[in-house]
Amino acid sequence: MPTLPRIDSFAAELTAIRRDLHAHPEIGFEEHRTSGIVAAKLQDWGIEVHRGIGGTGVVGILKGNGESGRRIGLRADMDALPMQETTNLPWRSTIPNRFHGCGHDGHTTMLLGTARYLAETRNFDGTVVFIFQPAEEGLGGARAMLADGLFDRFPCDEVYGLHNAPDLGPGEVTIFPGPSMAGADFFDITIAGYGSHGAMPDRSRDPVVVAMTLGQALQTIVSRNVDPLKSAVLSITQIHAGSAYNVIPGEARLAGTVRAFSDEVRALVRERMRAIAAGIAAAFHVEINVDIRDIFTVLVNHEEHSRAVAEVARDVVGADNVSTTPRPKMGSEDFADMLKAVPGAYFWVGHEGSVPLHNPGFVLDDGILPVGASLFSRLIETRLPVSHAR
Ligand code: NI
C-alpha cells in the first residue's frame, strides 16, 4: 500500500514513540507526561506550540508554503482507560489500572508522524492546526478545549479525526457522510421509599420493587415510543439497593446510558423517562429523582469532507480498501463536538488483530502508524494545495 515513503522511513521511530506512550498510559485530564512529550516533539520539529488548552490539551500551529489563509485542524485524543491490561507484550502498561485499551496512544503517534512529515516537507499552502485532545473517554475533553476557545484562538475551516478499528482489515478505511456515531446521555435515578423489616413489607414503601418495575417500564420507551425506523438504546447498567437479607432498604438507585442518532429521539427518550418515573412515583408513593446528563453529541460527518477523505484514502490504501457504505456505530466519540463547530469528517482505519477496543487484551498493530500519518498528511496536501501559478 503506498504510504508516503518519507513517513515509512521513520516508521520505526513512530513505533518507539507509540510503545513508550503505551507503557506509560494516563487517563483523562492527567495526560501530563504524554502532553509533555507531544509538546517537546512538536517544538523540535519547529512547530509553534500552545499548551494547557482545556486542561492538558496541546495545539501545534504549522504554516505551509504560500499565502493562503486557509486553516485545517487535525485532531488526536491522548487519554487511556482506567482498566488493567492483560497482554504480556514487552511494552505493556507499567501503571496498574491504566491501559491504552482504545489505541489513543496510536492516534497521538499518527498525528505526531503527520506533524513531523508536514514540518519537514511543507508541501501545502495554508496552516495546519494540530489538536492533541485530552479526556475523550466520557470526561468531556473536546468540550473542555472548545470552552477554552480552541476554535476562537486557532480558527479552522475544516477539521478531521480518525480512530483505529481492529474490526477492519489492515489498511481498510471506512468513511461515510451523515450521522456516524451515536449521541449519548448518562443517567442516575434515585428512588426514595421507606425501609422496614423484611418480614413486614406492609410497613415499607419498598424501593426495590419500584426499581424493578421502573427498569421494566423504561424498556418500553425504545419498543413503544421511538419510531421503529429510527434507532435508540436505553441500557440500565447499574442497580444498587440494600445490604441485608431481612431489611427492606429505604433507597434504590439505577444508572445507565441512552444512545441515539438524532437530537429529536434523544429529547423524546429523556421526556418519556421523566414521565414514566413520575407516574410510577405517584403509583407507589415514593419519590423518584431522575438526573440525565448529555455526555456525547451525535457525530455527523459532512458530505464534502467525507468525500475528500474517501478520495485521499483511495490514493493511499487503494480503492478496494475504502468503504463509503454507511455503517453507523452506537458507540460515541467526543470529536462530534468539534464537528458541530467546524465542518469536517471522522474516519476509521483498520489494523491487524481481532481483540475489540476496550477489551483488556486489546493490541494495537503498529503497522497502522504510517498509514494513519500518510492519510492525514495527504489530506492536508490535497485540501491545501500549493498553487502552481506562482
Ligand atoms: Ni477511542
Image (tube, rainbow, N blue to C red):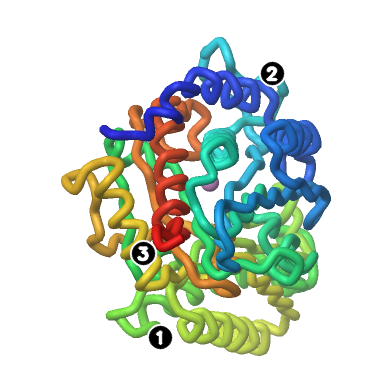
* Residue 126 to residue 3: above or below: below
Amino acid of disc 3: Ser
Looking at the rendered structure, the secondary structure element under dot 3 is helix
- Kind of residue indicated by mark 1: Asn
Q: Which residue is mark 3?
A: 306
Res. 318 image quadrant: top left
Q: In the rendering, at what x and y percent does residue 192 appear?
A: 77, 72
For the point 44% across and 22% down, which residue is it? 9
Tell me if residue 225 can be seen. yes
Q: Which element is circle 2 on? A: loop
Q: Which residue is mark 1?
A: 225
Numbered disc total? 3
Q: Earlier in the sequence, mark 3 or mark 1?
A: 1
Residue under numbered circle 2: 94
Q: Please, what is the three-letter code of the amino acid marked with disc 2?
A: Thr
Left or right of residue 265, residue 337 in this image: right
